[in-house]
Image: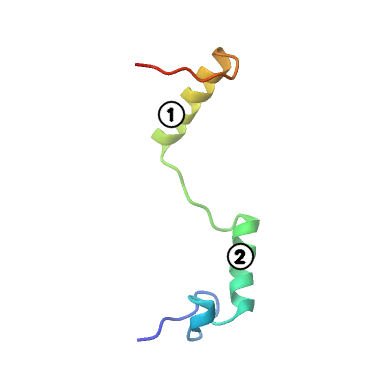
Amino acid sequence: MQSKCPICKKPSVFDYRPFCSKRCADIDLAHWFRGDYRIEKDEDENEMLGEEDQEEDQNHGKRTQTT
């Protein structure tokens, strides 16, 4: 079974897989650039990043190794 283009639903073409053409591939890329598609982060991951940023601020941008 051949897959369908996620943009226009026509059969996909090997050279532009999973799309049917360069046009549909470019449309999809534009969606990513505009922020239409997002990869969500877990809240725990965001909290961990916040803690690392706080540690950097306290150490004047220098990371320290914790044991």
Taking the image as shown, residue 45 lies to the left or right of residue 31, namely left
Give residue 55's position: percent from left, percent from top: 50, 18
Q: Residue at x 58, y 68 (%)?
A: 28
Give residue 9's position: percent from left, percent from top: 50, 81
Give residue 48's position: percent from left, percent from top: 43, 29
Number of the label disc, if any, that sits on residue 58 = none
Asked which secondary structure carries label 2, the reply is: helix
Mark 2 highlights which residue? 29
Q: CA distance from mark 1 to mark 2?
A: 30 Å
Query: Within 10 angstroms of label 1, few (less than 14), some, or many (20 or more) residues?
Result: few
Q: Residue at x 56, y 18 (%)?
A: 62
Q: Count the numbered circles shown.
A: 2
Residue toward you, 67 or 43: 67
Give the quadrant of the N terminus: bottom left
Q: Residue at x 50, y 84 (%)?
A: 13
Q: Please, what is the three-letter code of the amino acid marked with disc 2?
A: Leu
Q: Is residue 24 above or below residue 50?
A: below
Give residue 3's position: percent from left, percent from top: 41, 81
Q: Residue at x 39, y 85 (%)?
A: 2
Q: Please, what is the three-letter code of the amino acid marked with disc 1?
A: Met
Query: Within 10 angstroms of label 2, few (less than 14), some, or many (20 or more) residues?
Result: some
Mark 1 highlights which residue? 48
Figure coloring: rainbow
Q: Quadrant of residue 24?
A: bottom right
Asked which secondary structure carries label 1, the reply is: helix
